[in-house]
Structures are given as C-alpha cells and as structure tokens.
Image: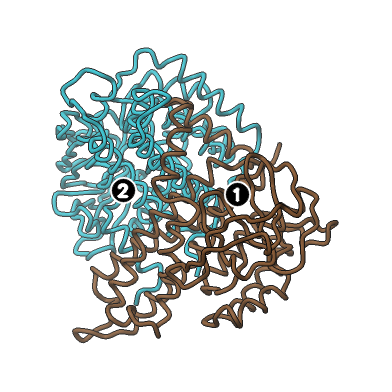
C-alpha cells in the first residue's frame, strides 16, 4: 500500500469509525469538512491526487462503517468537473446518472449530469426533485432540470458505471462488516449448551458467506486497478454484477444466523443489510449489467472472450 | 476484517508474447483433439502434446536447470497454465507431475530422486500420480492403512489405494503410507515414490460415469520398494501431504474445467443473442472474471512466499461451484437437445456428466468450508 493511501485510509477509518451509527445531520458536515470530495482531483488542481484504488479503499471503509453521508457521489462529481476543466462550486455536488435517482439530491448545492457525451453542471435552483428514500433511509430524489446548466463540456465518462463501481466498493465493506458481526454473534451466542459457532451447519453457512464477501472485495479492487489503467467498462460491469450476486447470497445468511436479534432496529446489522439491499438495485440491476456484459461478450466470440479478458488484465502488468 | 485483499499479479517478461506463443502451439496441434476432451482438459491425456510442451520448455518451468527445468517465475508458469486450460489443450498426462509431484520432490526429495524423475517430467515423458485415498479413507485421509514395513532389503508395502487418477498411464505414484506399525491418525505416515512397474504392484481400472477410464485402484501385495524411495522425513508424511494439498487448491484449473462449454455457447448463439441468453453469458463472464482475479491474486501471494490457506480454499470452493453450475445454467436457459450432434449439445452433455467430479478432487465443498471456518476464527 502506498504511503499516501495508508494516510488516507487511516484518516477515513478514524472519522467513519467516529461517525458510525450517527445520522446524516451529524455525519454529513464532518465528512464534508474533511475534504474527501477532492480525492480524485489532481494535486496541481488543489486535490488529493488519489487514484481509483484509493477511492476503492475509502468507499469500502464507508461501507464498513455504514456511513450516513454523501461521499461517493461528490468524489465522482468533483473528478469529472476537474477533468472537464470546470471549477467545482462550493457545497455539496452530487451526480445524476441517466435513469437513476439522485443520491442526496435535496441537500445538494449542484448536480453533475452526463448525457450524449456532454457533462452539464446544474445549480440547485435549476433542479426540481421528487423526493424518495432508499431502504436505508437515505435521500434518493428523482430530478427534473427546470433551468439551464451553469457550465457544460464534452465528457466521455459513463456516469452509471462510475456509480456502479462506487456501490461495489461500499458493498465490499458492508459485507465484510455484516460478516464480522455475524462471526461475533455466533461465537458469543450459546444455544443447546454451546456457542452457535460450534455447529457445523453454522460454520458451513458462514464459510459460504465469507466467499461472497471475498469475491466482492476482489472484484472491486480489480475493477479499481482496471480504472487506473484506463477504460474499464468490462470490469465494472462484471464487478457490479458479481456484487449483486454476493448481496443476494450473503444478506440472508447474516440475518438467518442472527435470528430475531438481527431484525431489530437497535442492533447494528440492519445498517449494513438495508444499505446492501438498496445498493443491489442502484446503478444497474443484475439483469441490466448481465445483458450489457453478455451482449459485449457475444460480439467478442467464444475465443475472443478469453483474449479480451487477458489483454485487459495484462495492461496492469508493469512493462519489463 | 478484509477476508481477501488483492495482491498484484506481476510476472516478469513479455506476458502477451508468452500468451501468443502458447496460443500458437495450440493452434498448431488442435486439429486432432476430440471436442469433449477440450473441457475438463487437465484430465485429458495426449502424450504427443505433453512432449511438445516439454520440448518448448513449458513444463517444469520453475525448476532448476540442472534438473531439466527452466528457472522461470511461478507467475510465468501460471500464465502458461491458464492459456493451456482456456485453450482446451490436453494437459492431463503431465499435470500432476508438473504441478505437484515435481515441486514436492524439489522440496523434500533426495538428489537421486530428483535426478531420476525431474528431467523426464520436464520433458513431458515421465508422469506421476498421487496415492492418497483408500477404500476406507476418502475425505478422512488420516485413516489410511496401507502399510510400509522397513526391512533391510527395503520397504514391504501391503494394502490398496483407490481413485488414483491416471495411475494406468503413470510411471510412479507418490504414495502416503503408514510406516509406523500401530500408529494412529496422522502420526506415523510417510511418503514413498513408488515405481508402478515394481513386482507386487497392480493397477486396475475403474470406469467413471462418463464412460472414461482415469480412476484406478492400486494394489500392493508385499511389494518390495527400495529404501531410498522415501521422500522427505519418515513419519512426516502428513505434514508434507497437507502442505501439498493447500498449494494446489487455487490454480486456474479450479474454475476453468467447463470453459470449453462457455466458448461453445457464445459461438453457438452468435453476436446478437436473445436478452435471456445474453444475461446468462454476462453472468458466467462476471463470475469467471472474478474467479480469475481471485486465483491470480492467490498465485501472486504464493509466489511472494505467503501462505494464503483460507484464500486458496475460497478459490477452490467458489471455482468448483461455478464450473459445476455452468452446465446446469446453460441447460436451464436453452432448449437443449442433449442427443443432438452439435458442438454445444455434445459439450453440454459431457460437462453435465463430468461435473460431479469437479468438487470431489482436492477436497469436497464441506471439507473446504471447514478449513475456511477454522481459518476465519470460528471458535
């Protein structure tokens, strides 16, 4: 791990750990103050100069602590604005991917949208929101632009894919957290005269859960490595789809092994599982990414799939 | 807790050129290969192609040159292996010697044993099998009973091994034996490298449910095995075997056994499939891509000297589940005529039938999940 990434993750871990269990009114201002929004903005433009691997690490920690504050969306927005050479406005900037609700839209000072190869920055007074909430209670607001953009510029980014990448990273952390809670619970909870962890059926189920958490962590890190090499549409599609499959497989196991305790509002598990249930749908369902990826692969042909996949990962190997 | 942190896969040298070389070799030899054998191809035998790989320097790649090896990086070997597997090449005959027996001899074997076996293994001419299971010792390997009694003339071996893949085509079997009379469980076990043409050693076929002969029984009837056939330390056989098993769990063969079916599916449906079929291809691709990343990361950790036991077990369990699910998912999505003569139908039928074997080699899902649970702190 690079020194800068270590500093970044230590800072994120400290802050998000402090804010665990706090709601948006407490967590939002603290996260905004910490300046994470400039994570991907180059140093010479006043940002942190981080890469996608850094972003994965930070968003994973946000998922690990069930952070109730906008983080992924402002980072992506500031990144795209910097790339487009548009000065970022003060305050909270979020993103409007096509066909998606806008996370934290009602609280935003500006919204970045990308459509037809053009990035547009809208001020809050040009946005009309139809408010909604995610299963975790976070704002998810449908937007209609009622005024013109403050600024616009050509942009080749796939906002939906970048949002999907963010959800994979958050899901990696949330699944790890749900797994750790479950391990703790089955080690402590005694039934039939012994800890639940002593039952082979419980061990087998948890081992299966760990495999799903492992798969999402690897998929997210590999997608980040691909993004750091350039175009990563294939990897992000695969990673989001794999994350969705893992959420589908992991969340029921966490709840099953917790029994009624895990179904209460008081116990922490729901902070992770309600988010995971929401992220499963956000920035592309299983069917959406499976069809998009499958259509892409079908055009490669049978052998072409392997050739494409290896050529893409070979990009990440340092030249001899 | 992060169960699986990624490790960069960073082999030296020109990796695309290495891939191109393996692909050209496959293209030059694939004309005569039977279609079905292109799946599960680390159980497909072709002596001529094994010798080709030996001549090309693609076997024993990481071994010292003085034993016929090529002193290449383990991740270069990984690249060659995944290309051969994904390309459907018949690599079964030399697979065990190259992956497992050769490296074990390098680690524990005597100079004589290395000189006797390794150059031929690296040439693709000497093949090995692994004598572990017995009629009453399967997943519970510590209950092996086949015995080797030390005498001045040599080891007197009596008993029976079973499910020994490829024994009928192998020259030698690295065999786990009870060398201490009356010892229990995992104590008192040792490994002997037994030449299969030794008098008193009989190999008999077991035909599997696909109609193929790769399983065997090996009977030992007071066979006299030279004293210097002992590999490693007497009484340390269990430790040597378990280390060997842990290292072989995360290779590309653990998720690519059904790959030829995915290739055939994509080719059969063409560039513009119906949405449901595109979704199936997308899902299989996403799982394969993730497994490949997990397998490469584990290989890189092994190459760096780490001991990623939990990760390796995770790769094998998820990989086997994937390669077993693939034929069922394809069958569910297609209106498949299993009696038809198309490539897709033939491969689907073959992989459906072969797939139960994918999770019985190298540890069942239940055994692997036990290892994972223990490694993850379930008390």
10 Å crowding of disc 2: few (<14), some (14-19), many (20+) = some
Subunit of label 2: B
Query: Would you say A255 lies left or right of A4 here?
Result: left
Q: Position of residue A289 (x, y in %)?
A: 45, 44
Residue of label 1: A159
Which is more toward the observer, A112 or A202? A112
**Which image quadrant for residue B274?**
top left
Quarter holding residue A288: top left
* Chain coloured cyan: B
Spatial separation of the CA atoms under disc 1 and disc 2: 33 Å
Looking at the image, residue B173 sits to the left or right of residue A116; the answer is left
Q: Is residue B276 above or below residue B243?
A: above
- Residue drawn 24% across the image and 74% down it: A199
Spot occupied by residue A248 in the image (x, y as percentages of width and height): 35, 58
- The residue under the point 15% across, 23% down is B339
Residue A192 at x, y = what percent?
19, 84
For label 1, count other residues whose C-alpha is less than 10 Å away and answer few (under 14), some (14-19) or many (20+): many
**Same chain, labels 1 and 2:** no
> Which SS class for mark 1?
helix
Query: Chain drawn brown, letter?
Result: A
Which residue reaches farthest right?
Answer: A44
- For the C terminus of chain A, give its image quadrant: top right
Residue B348, quarter of picture: top left
- The answer to whether residue B224 is visible is no
Residue indicated by mark 2: B321
Chain at tag 1: A
């Amino acid at each position: 791990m690079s020194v800068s990434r270590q500093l970044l993750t230590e800072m994120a871990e400290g802050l998000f750990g402090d804010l665990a269990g706090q709601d948006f009114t407490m967590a939002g201002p603290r996260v905004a103050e910490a300046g994470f929004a400039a994570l991907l903005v180059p140093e010479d433009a006043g940002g942190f100069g981080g890469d996608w691997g850094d972003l994965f690490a930070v968003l994973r920690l946000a998922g690990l602590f069930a952070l109730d504050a906008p983080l992924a969306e402002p980072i992506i927005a500031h990144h795209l604005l910097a790339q487009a050479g548009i000065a970022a406005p003060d305050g909270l900037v979020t993103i409007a991917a096509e066909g998606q609700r806008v996370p934290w839209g009602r609280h935003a000072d500006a919204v970045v949208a990308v459509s037809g190869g053009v990035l547009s920055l809208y001020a809050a007074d040009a946005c009309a929101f139809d408010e909604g909430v995610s299963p975790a209670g976070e704002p998810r607001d449908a937007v209609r632009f009622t005024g013109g953009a403050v600024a616009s510029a050509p942009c080749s980014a796939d906002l939906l894919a970048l949002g999907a990448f963010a959800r994979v990273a958050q899901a990696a952390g949330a699944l790890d957290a749900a797994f750790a809670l479950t391990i703790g619970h089955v080690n402590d909870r005694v039934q039939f005269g012994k800890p639940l962890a002593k039952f082979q059926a419980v061990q087998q189920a948890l081992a299966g859960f760990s495999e799903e958490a492992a798969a999402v962590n690897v998929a997210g890190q590999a997608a980040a490595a691909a993004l750091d090499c350039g175009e990563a549409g294939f990897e992000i599609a695969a990673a989001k789809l794999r994350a969705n499959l893992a959420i589908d497989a992991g969340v029921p196991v966490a709840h099953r092994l917790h029994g009624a305790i895990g179904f209460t509002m008081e116990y922490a598990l729901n902070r992770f599982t309600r988010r995971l249930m929401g992220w499963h749908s956000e920035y592309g369902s299983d069917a959406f990414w499976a069809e998009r990826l499958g259509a892409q692969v079908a055009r490669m042909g049978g052998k072409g799939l392997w050739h494409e996949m290896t050529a893409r990962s070979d990009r990440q190997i340092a030249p001899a | 807790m992060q169960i699986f942190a990624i490790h960069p896969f960073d082999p030296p040298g020109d990796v695309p050129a290495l891939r191109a070389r393996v692909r050209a070799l496959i293209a030059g030899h694939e004309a005569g290969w039977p279609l079905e054998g292109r799946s599960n191809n680390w159980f497909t035998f072709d002596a001529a192609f094994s010798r080709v790989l030996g001549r090309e320097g693609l076997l024993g790649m990481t071994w010292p040159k003085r034993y016929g090896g090529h002193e290449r990086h383990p991740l270069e070997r990984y690249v060659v292996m995944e290309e051969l597997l994904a390309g459907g090449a018949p690599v079964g005959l030399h697979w065990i010697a190259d992956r497992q027996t050769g490296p074990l001899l390098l680690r524990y074997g005597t100079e004589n044993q290395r000189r006797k076996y390794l150059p031929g293994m690296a040439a693709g001419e000497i093949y090995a099998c692994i004598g572990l299971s017995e009629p009453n010792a399967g997943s519970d390997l510590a209950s092996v009973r086949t015995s080797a009694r030390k005498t001045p003339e040599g080891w007197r071996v009596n008993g029976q091994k079973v499910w020994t893949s490829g024994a009928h085509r192998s020259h030698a079997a690295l065999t786990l034996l009870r060398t201490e009379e009356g010892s229990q469980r995992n104590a008192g076990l040792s490994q002997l490298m037994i030449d299969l043409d030794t008098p008193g050693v009989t190999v008999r076929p077991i035909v599997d449910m696909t109609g193929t002969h790769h399983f065997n029984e090996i009977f030992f009837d007071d066979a006299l095995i030279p004293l210097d056939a002992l590999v490693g330390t007497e009484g340390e056989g269990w430790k040597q075997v378990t280390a060997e098993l842990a290292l072989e769990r995360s290779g590309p063969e653990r998720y690519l056994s059904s790959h030829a079916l995915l290739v055939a599916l994509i080719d059969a449906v063409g560039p513009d499939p119906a949405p449901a079929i595109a979704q199936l291809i997308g899902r299989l691709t996403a799982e394969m891509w993730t497994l490949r990343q997990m397998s490469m990361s584990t290989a890189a950790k092994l190459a760096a000297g780490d001991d990623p036991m939990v990760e390796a077990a995770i790769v094998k369990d998820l990989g086997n589940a994937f390669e077993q699910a693939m034929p069922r998912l394809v069958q569910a999505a297609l209106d498949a005529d299993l009696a038809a003569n198309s490539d897709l139908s033939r491969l689907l039928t073959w992989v459906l039938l072969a797939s139960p074997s994918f999770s019985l080699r190298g540890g069942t899902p239940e055994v692997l999940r036990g290892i994972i649970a223990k490694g993850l702190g379930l008390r």
